[in-house]
């Protein structure tokens, strides 16, 4: 008891000392890195990992190479997309390896505050859309045009869709216009959020196992295609006019998602002082096939991320040797 | 009718206990300045209590007062002195205000009005430091429910008061060990209060109070929670302390036999007021009112009252010279024995001077209680005639 | 209104005399009064603003201002003095402390940490706790989770120290000042009833994502039990002892240090224990806002449906919880022993102090030796080749389970069918019913329930909380959440009571159940989510399943304890009158355990709500989804409004189920 109190007091005192040690001066919390950084006597790079597996594949390979080739220690932090920008700006993470396009954040942090620097393209092109399983598309080819979706609404019903067809959406953090699309295209569907990508994948796998029809929001590149082949449903073509309208008021969007070249972003401070690690991350670029290879090993073969990265690195030295320059 | 815990057996040996005190009482009569001097003390509980003392409100009945102001009077205009070396007993039934009164003495409860002086020093005017000093060194209290610290050993409980005073560890432990020994708990130093019986716990409480070597000991119904046999042991302990060490005591009790047993003087309280204050003999022999009379009705008078009360004036010069000589503090019971043995009246002698004579008749009238009922004596006389 | 009408009929047929006696009962009087008030106000309100869902006229749009506030904070975080000179220092201090502790843990190495923890557990709670600690840390290492475990531990140590310090200070203030206590108590009560998720958003708003806000959220979450118990302990001190201490001339400080604090020791220790457990559960949840460590591993594993990896990270959390609980709770029993009978007399006394110093020295030497040995062996971090990969076998097992249980079990159907039935037959009608309830009717209903069980104050708080949800424009969403909570609570209570009755009757069942309950109560909520998704698909059904599994242990424990505590004399007399087991249960045990039963309902509501909210991650929708959405999209306005609505809902549910406690003397 007394000991517990003494311990508490001691740590409280340490905290107070820590406060006083930081002085009476300004303490810019946007410049405070993770307490775990550089702890083991080596330099640390902190990478933001988003919840989808592609992003984990990037991070796994980057981590492996940074640790084994360049002698860094890497921490990965799982943060959702938008908050990751804030963390990147504050220096709590050093790099985002795969960004799907956040114009607002880019404007705020890259253009205005200049706390984040463009890290170049990842080499992978991302695409969001609506997909149905191949077994269903083969049987009903006309489902691939959005105009015929209402015909199949009854077959797509789910427990959460309230009598309408179910359009399965994933994590709330993903970029999505689906509610507006359903409304504006007058579809007899209800957007049902799985809540997380994990939940969505589980659901898709279950449907696939039973060969049930479903309509889902999904994106490329994604390893799940290898396990559950899916075909994209054509939505009204993406146009700049439609995109502009959408920027002004997201509720008015009535066309498909754009195709996005995925980009990397680095903390500005880190680009200046990060040395070899920063250069390496800037150089990091690979293809959709490369990424999927690693992603599949992680998500489907349940390999630990570092083992997956190790296998890929041993197989494809020609790809990563360039990044070390 | 008040129910009084009166037990003839326990009173039997009153004399043995209190005899030396009779001497103490004698010197108590001297005009040594009182230890505690209390004048017109009031304690009123409730909102804006200070308006009650001395005003018309004070004359209301308790119910009316509570109705009107929300206040309750616990101590009402009480005055008394506690003389050095005496054991001053405050007794009354529960709710009579006695416990509040004793707490007012060291301001554990803040009095509402009146003055309290210890050795002539104004207690109510003391600042925090002086008051602490008073509690630490001059007046220590023993409580009905012991008030021991359950997480400390017996030894550390006894040393607690000294610890608070800032006495060094070795010194206070030595002193505490001495006190533990003194109250008869040697060998139990390392136990905790939870492992002791009630009587043992109260011994710890007593030792704790003694450890500070206070000028006055305050007892708040210290033995009420104890078994009768243990209670008697403890009472003897207190009397011994009073007699051997001459410690001044204020002793609160609701038990008349206890009051008579330990008290040099007794203040009887009722409804916050002191109804009567006097020696046990005065209380038993001359009750101030019916309430007190009722209270002391069952007391074996011959064991409390002394020959001083039973004696009659010397009728002839011969009487003053012959017969057994008795100290004025001798109880009637003892006098009866002396008179019965010699078969003749005995003299009451104080410092060589004969104060009066006791004979069969005067002694028996005490036993029969005739002295307190003059009318009845008269009618009886007539009947005999 | 509706309650008034349901309550009247049986009385209407009663003779007038009985009506009068009935009205003399306070509950009836309250209902009558409320009925009259509603009868007057409801038509007016309905005519003015319309019936049905919460009227738009009564909502306030906070999204705009909140969004602007959020933008302002992000833009000014590196420039404004408030951040530079206040929040910045807080954040800095937290990071420095966590870093300091983390570095110490790393420097001790795995050998040093394990040895130190075991010795500490030994000293505080005995040999069994020491063995538990030793085994637990070894398992953490074996699972390959050493570094994340150390990070969580570092964060925990700082957060718990801060919680205990803050809580003790608050508790001290509350314990010593009546006014403080009166002000504090409802706040603390409320804070304990709120779901953990609701605490995340405000700190993210100010501090962004990272360890500092995670620690802060943890402290805010974990300090209230400490504060509350400290205050209770100090207030509960035996007045007689305090008076005695005063009579000896103790100063205020002496009185506090030598009497009040030691006497409140049991509550203080319980407070520390509770703070630790709360901090651990929050530290895991805080991975959503960048807490790193074990929680982050669970979170990452969840995103790849990797139950095996989630379990690998979840097990160390559970072990950590068990070690911390056993170590601190073990101390509790020692405390109670020394306060009562049976303490070995040798423990105290003259030889104590020197011996203590000696043992301390012995330990310091022992630990230093182990550290030195460990470092000499070059093993600072857990050796890689000593790890066991459990992820793969666990996933295989899970896949088998999914294959065989998901659907098509003849006769009883599969879990997917159950989920569909639960959603279609229970949740949907309930939700539609609640959403179809006129808003004033819902308010009146809540007022009636709260007033029946508590005072007019609780009724007012509950009603205002519900109204606040409407004002925030979250009425329908909240009703959705509420329907999920109510349904899950119903299932929890039925199952919990059934299990508890069995456990209370059979000591053997109780013995078997106890360790299971212990483990289940300390499991991080996240870990429940994946298996339920595997079993029930996505949607509200798995969220409910997770909530039920999470809340069940507490209900079982409280109820069985209540039943077992029933006065044996009363039971004996019932038996002597020839009461059957069922009669004893109904007529003696349940009525005597009334307080515990009500507490169980209250706890069920609070716990179910907290998981239903997290259910937003697996398609539970409603308020939980909005919080997740707010965090994920950086749209803190939405998140904060949903968070506030959650808090209001939690407050309302707590008040409706919380019987008035007897006033403290």
Image: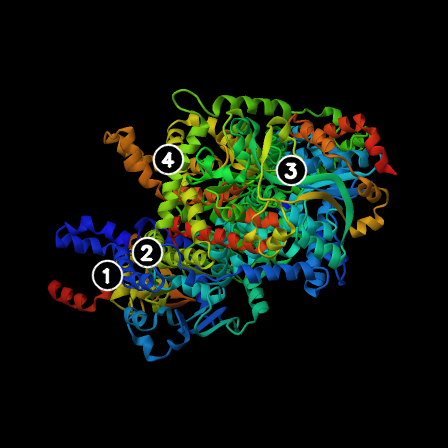
At mark 3, the secondary structure is: loop
| Mark 1: few/some/many CA within 10 Å (<14, 14-19, 20+) | some
| C212 left or right, relative to C42 | right
Q: CA distance from mark 4 to mark 2?
A: 74 Å
**Residue B256 percent location from the top left of the image:** 34, 57
Residue B142 visible to the viewer: no
Q: Are marks 4 and 3 on the same chain?
A: no
Residue A239 visible to the viewer: yes
Residue A244 or residue C167, whichever sits in front:
A244
| Mark 2: few/some/many CA within 10 Å (<14, 14-19, 20+) | many
| C502 left or right, relative to A125 | left
* Residue denoted by label 4: C494
Seen in the picture, residue C131 relative to C337 is either above or below; the reply is above
Q: CA distance from mark 1 to mark 2?
A: 12 Å
**Subunit ID for the residue under disc 1:** B
Seen in the picture, residue C261 relative to A210 is either above or below; the reply is below
**Residue A193 percent location from the top left of the image:** 52, 41
**Residue C342 percent location from the top left of the image:** 51, 36
Figure quadrant of the N terminus of chain B: bottom left
* Residue denoted by label 3: A52
Q: Quadrant of residue C45?
A: bottom left
Q: Give the mark nearest the N terminus, 1 or 2.
A: 2
- Check contact, mark 4 vs mark 3: CB within 8 A: no
């Amino acid at each position: 008891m007394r000991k517990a109190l003494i311990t508490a007091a001691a740590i409280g005192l340490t905290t107070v000392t820590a406060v006083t040690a930081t002085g009476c001066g300004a303490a810019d919390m946007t410049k405070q890195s993770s307490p775990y950084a550089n702890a083991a006597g080596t330099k640390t790079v902190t990478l933001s990992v988003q919840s989808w597996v592609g992003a984990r594949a990037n991070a796994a390979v980057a981590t492996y190479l940074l640790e084994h080739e360049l002698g860094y220690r890497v921490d990965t932090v799982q943060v959702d997309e938008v908050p990751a920008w804030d963390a990147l700006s504050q220096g709590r993470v050093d790099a985002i390896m795969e960004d799907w396009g956040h114009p607002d954040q880019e404007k705020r942090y890259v253009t205005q505050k200049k706390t984040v620097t463009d890290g170049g393209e990842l080499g992978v092109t991302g695409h969001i859309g609506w997909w149905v399983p191949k077994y269903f598309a083969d049987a009903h080819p006309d489902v691939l045009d959005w105009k015929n979706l209402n015909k199949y609404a009854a077959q797509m019903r789910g427990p959460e869709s309230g009598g309408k067809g179910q359009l399965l959406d994933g994590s709330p953090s993903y970029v999505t216009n689906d509610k507006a699309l359903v409304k504006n295209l007058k579809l007899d569907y209800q957007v049902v959020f799985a809540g997380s990508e994990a939940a969505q994948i589980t659901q898709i796998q279950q449907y696939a196992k039973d060969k049930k029809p479903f309509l889902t929001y999904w994106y490329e590149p994604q390893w799940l295609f290898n396990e559950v082949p899916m075909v994209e449903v054509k939505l009204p073509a993406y146009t700049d006019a439609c995109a502009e309208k959408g920027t002004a008021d997201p509720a008015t969007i009535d066309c498909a998602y754009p195709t996005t070249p995925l980009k990397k972003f680095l903390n500005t401070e880190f680009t200046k002082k990060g040395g070899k690690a920063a250069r390496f991350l800037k150089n990091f670029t690979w293809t959709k096939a490369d990424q999927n290879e690693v992603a599949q090993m992680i998500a489907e073969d349940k390999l630990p991320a570092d083992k997956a990265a190790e296998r890929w690195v041993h197989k494809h030295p020609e790809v990563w040797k360039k990044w070390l320059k | 009718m008040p129910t009084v815990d009166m037990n003839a057996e326990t009173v039997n040996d009153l004399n043995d206990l209190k005899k030396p005190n009779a001497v103490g009482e004698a010197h108590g009569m001297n005009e040594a300045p009182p230890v505690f001097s209390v004048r017109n003390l009031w304690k009123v509980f409730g909102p804006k209590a200070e308006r009650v003392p001395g005003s018309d409100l004070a004359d209301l009945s308790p119910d009316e007062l509570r109705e009107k102001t929300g206040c309750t009077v616990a101590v009402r205009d009480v005055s008394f002195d506690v003389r050095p070396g005496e054991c001053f007993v405050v007794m009354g039934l529960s709710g009579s205000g006695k416990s509040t009164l004793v707490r007012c003495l060291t301001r554990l409860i803040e009095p509402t009005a009146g003055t309290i002086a210890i050795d002539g020093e104004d207690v109510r005017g003391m600042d925090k430091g002086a008051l602490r000093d008073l509690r630490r060194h001059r007046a220590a209290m023993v409580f009905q429910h012991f008030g021991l610290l359950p997480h400390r050993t017996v030894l550390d409980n006894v040393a607690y008061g000294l610890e608070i005073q800032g006495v060094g560890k070795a010194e206070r432990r030595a002193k505490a060990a001495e006190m533990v020994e003194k109250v008869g708990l040697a060998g139990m130093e390392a136990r905790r209060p939870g492992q002791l019986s009630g009587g043992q716990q109260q011994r710890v409480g007593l030792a704790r109070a003694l450890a500070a070597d206070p000028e006055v000991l305050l007892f708040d119904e210290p033995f009420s929670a104890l078994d009768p046999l243990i209670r008697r042991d403890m009472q003897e302990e207190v009397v011994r302390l009073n007699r051997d060490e001459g410690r001044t005591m204020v002793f609160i009790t609701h038990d008349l036999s206890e009051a008579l047993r330990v008290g040099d003087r007794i203040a009887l309280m009722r409804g916050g007021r002191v109804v009567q204050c006097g020696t046990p003999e005065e209380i038993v022999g001359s009750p101030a009112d019916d309430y007190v009379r009722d209270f002391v009705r069952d007391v074996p008078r011959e064991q409390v009252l002394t020959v001083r009360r039973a004696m009659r004036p010397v009728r002839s010069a011969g009487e003053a010279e012959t017969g057994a000589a008795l100290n004025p503090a001798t109880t009637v019971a003892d006098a009866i024995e002396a008179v019965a043995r010699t078969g003749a009246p005995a003299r009451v002698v104080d410092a060589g001077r004969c104060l009066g004579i006791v004979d069969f008749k005067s002694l028996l009238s005490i036993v029969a209680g005739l002295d307190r009922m003059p009318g009845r004596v008269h009618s009886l006389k007539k009947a005999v005639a | 209104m509706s309650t008034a009408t349901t309550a009247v009929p049986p009385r209407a047929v009663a003779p007038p005399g009985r009506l009068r006696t009935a009205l003399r009962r306070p509950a009836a009087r309250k209902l009558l009064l409320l009925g009259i008030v509603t009868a007057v106000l409801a038509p007016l309100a309905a005519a003015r603003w319309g019936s049905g869902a919460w009227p738009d006229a009564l909502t306030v749009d906070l999204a705009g201002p909140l969004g602007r506030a959020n933008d302002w904070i992000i833009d000014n975080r590196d420039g404004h003095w408030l951040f530079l000179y206040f929040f910045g220092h807080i954040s800095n201090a937290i990071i420095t402390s966590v870093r300091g502790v983390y570095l110490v843990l790393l420097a001790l190495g795995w050998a040093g940490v394990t040895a130190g923890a075991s010795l500490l557990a030994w000293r505080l709670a005995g040999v069994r706790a020491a063995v538990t600690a030793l085994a637990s840390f070894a398992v953490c290492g074996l699972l390959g989770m050493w570094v994340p475990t150390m990070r969580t531990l570092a964060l925990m140590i700082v957060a718990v120290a801060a919680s205990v310090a803050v809580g003790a200070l608050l508790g001290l203030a509350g314990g010593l000042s009546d006014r403080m206590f009166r002000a504090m108590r409802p706040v603390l009560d409320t804070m304990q009833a709120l779901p953990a998720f609701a605490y995340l958003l405000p700190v993210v708003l100010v501090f962004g994502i990272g360890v500092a806000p995670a620690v802060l959220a943890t402290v805010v979450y974990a300090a209230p039990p400490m504060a509350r118990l400290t205050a209770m302990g100090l207030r509960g001190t035996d007045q007689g002892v305090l008076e005695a201490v005063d009579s000896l001339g103790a100063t205020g400080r002496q009185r506090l240090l030598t009497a009040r604090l030691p006497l409140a020791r049991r509550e203080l220790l319980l407070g520390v224990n509770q703070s630790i457990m709360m901090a651990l559960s929050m530290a895991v949840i805080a991975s959503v806002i960048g807490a790193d460590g074990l929680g982050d591993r669970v979170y990452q594993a969840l995103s790849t449906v990797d139950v095996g990896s989630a379990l690998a990270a979840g097990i160390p959390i559970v072990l950590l919880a068990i070690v911390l609980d056993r170590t601190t709770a073990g101390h509790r029993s020692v405390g109670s022993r020394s306060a009562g009978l049976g303490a070995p007399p040798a423990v105290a006394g003259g030889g104590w102090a020197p011996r203590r110093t000696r043992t301390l020295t012995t330990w310091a030497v022992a630990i230093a030796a182990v550290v030195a040995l460990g470092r000499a062996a070059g093993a600072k971090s857990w050796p890689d080749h000593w790890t066991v990969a459990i992820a793969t076998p666990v996933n295989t097992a899970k896949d088998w389970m999914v294959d065989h249980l998901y659907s098509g079990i003849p006769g009883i159907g599969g879990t997917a069918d159950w989920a569909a039935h639960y959603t279609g037959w229970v949740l949907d009608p309930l939700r539609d019913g609640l959403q179809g309830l006129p808003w004033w009717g819902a308010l009146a209903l809540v007022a009636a329930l709260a007033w029946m069980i508590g005072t007019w104050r609780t009724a007012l708080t509950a009603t205002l909380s519900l109204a606040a949800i409407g004002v925030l424009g979250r009425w329908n969403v909240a009703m959705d959440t509420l329907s999920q909570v109510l349904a899950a609570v119903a299932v929890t209570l039925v199952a919990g009571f059934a299990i508890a009755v069995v456990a209370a009757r059979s000591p053997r069942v109780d013995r078997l159940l106890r360790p299971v309950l212990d483990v289940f109560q300390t499991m991080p909520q996240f870990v429940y989510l994946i298996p339920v998704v595997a079993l029930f698909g996505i949607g509200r059904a798995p969220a409910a399943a997770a909530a039920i599994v999470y809340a069940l242990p507490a209900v079982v424990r409280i109820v069985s304890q209540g039943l077992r505590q029933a006065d044996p004399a009363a039971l004996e007399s019932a038996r002597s009158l020839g009461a059957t087991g069922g009669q004893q249960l109904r007529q003696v045990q349940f009525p005597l355990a009334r307080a515990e039963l009500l507490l169980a309902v209250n706890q069920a509501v609070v716990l179910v709500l907290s998981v239903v909210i997290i259910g937003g991650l697996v398609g539970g929708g409603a308020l939980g989804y909005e919080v997740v959405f707010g965090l994920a999209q950086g749209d803190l306005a939405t998140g904060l409004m949903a968070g506030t609505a959650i808090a209001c809902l939690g407050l309302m549910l707590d008040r409706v189920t919380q019987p008035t406690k007897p006033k403290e003397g």
